[in-house]
Amino acid sequence: KHFCGGIDINKSQKTIDNLWKSKIGTILDYSAEGKETENDYNLVMHQVLESINKAKDTNKIPFTVFKPTGLTKFALLEKMSLNSTLSSNEKKEKKLFISRIETICKKASENKVPVFIDAEESWIQDPVDQIAFEMMLKFNKNKAYIFNTIQLYRTDRYKYLKQLIKAGKNKSIYIGVKLVRGAYHEQEIQRALEKNLTCPVHTLKENTDKDYDDALELCMKNINLVSVCAGTHNEKSSKKLISLIKNYNIRKDDDRIFFSQLLGMSDNISYNTSKAGFNVAKYVPYGPVKDVIPYLIR
């Protein structure tokens, strides 16, 4: 029933075992999204909690992940992002949504298993950012256990990262970020054209690359506050991070810095970076195949 990176999870165990032998960790991501019922949302939550249970007993699973749209309706996040008036039922749904996230984050911090809150489309991201920061305020007082995901193809995300770090300093908490380029580029451009909106994403790849690499440097400058997972299949950005680690005299195996690539992709980066002594984890999406297909298509 469960597929792992598009492969039957039982057949994938040999691949994962080989990663562990090479000192490469795995990041478990129950990749269900776009759910519509309370039963579905609770199932996703319990799957994430189970992944935390599995991770707490081994150092080979350094992170777990959840996607906000696996825990509530897309439409609710749209209304929250617009600050629209919610119906009484929607207010209850919002409360349950935040409660599920807090349950996951609380368990993650108690078991010392950092958790990534995955990114969504730009027009539903604002409430996710707000909730992620609220969770950081509660659970990142001694170390970064709650990570927000920042998509650097967005024109405003480098600025957001600077604001997030400043807020962390002001509130005396640690900041966790997973840096990625982004997953919804065509959707973002098409929606902006259809609605006559300012395009929220870079249309030139070199601008995305610049923001991504600048974000890496900003994190290294603030390493005493920030923990970062560099989710990238880009060799230049991976080399950039290696150079930054050296330039800022940071240990290769500092647990505040991880490189990450998807299972089955960019193994040349994963294995060579791990062999050089840096922290590496393969990102492993899994779940019922019908639920994982949207993730795999992106």
Image (cartoon, helix red, strand yellow):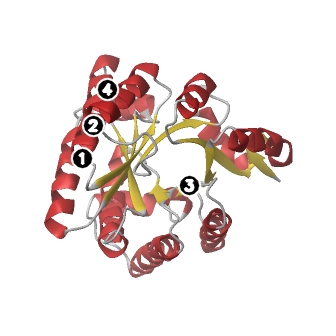
Q: Pointers 2 and 4 in contact (CB under 8 A)? A: no
Percent across and percent down for residue 228 are 38, 47
Q: Residues within 10 Å of mark 1 (few under 14, many from 20)?
A: some
**Given the image, on which type of amino acid does mark 4 rest?**
Thr
Of the residues under marks 2 and 1, which one precedes in the sequence? 1
Q: Residue 62 carries which label?
A: 3
Of the residues under marks 1 and 3, which one precedes in the sequence? 3
Instruction: Give the CA distance from mark 2 to mark 1.
Output: 7 Å
Q: Is mark 1 on a helix, strand or loop?
A: helix
Using the image as rendered, state which of residue 68 and residue 214 is in the foreground. 214
**Given the image, on which type of amino acid does mark 3 rest?**
Pro
Instruction: Give the CA distance from mark 4 to mark 3.
Output: 27 Å
Of the residues under marks 4 and 1, which one precedes in the sequence? 1
Would you name the residue on which mark 2 appears?
Answer: 215
Q: Pointers 2 and 1 in contact (CB under 8 A)? A: yes
Of the residues under marks 3 and 2, which one precedes in the sequence? 3
Q: Pointers 1 and 3 in contact (CB under 8 A)? A: no
Of the residues under marks 2 and 4, which one precedes in the sequence? 4
Of the residues under marks 4 and 3, which one precedes in the sequence? 3
Q: Which mark is residue 288?
A: none
Q: What element carries label 2?
A: helix
Q: Pointers 4 and 3 in contact (CB under 8 A)? A: no
In the image, residue 239 above or below residue 225:
above
- Quadrant of the rendered image containing residue 213: top left
Would you name the residue on which mark 4 appears?
Answer: 208
**Given the image, on which type of amino acid does mark 2 rest?**
Ala
Would you name the residue on which mark 1 appears?
Answer: 161
Percent across and percent down for residue 63 are 54, 55
- Mark toward the viewer: 3 or 2: 3
- Quadrant of the rendered image containing residue 216: top left
Q: Which residue is drawn at 59% across and 69% down?
A: 45
Q: Which residue is drawn at 47% across and 55% down?
A: 116
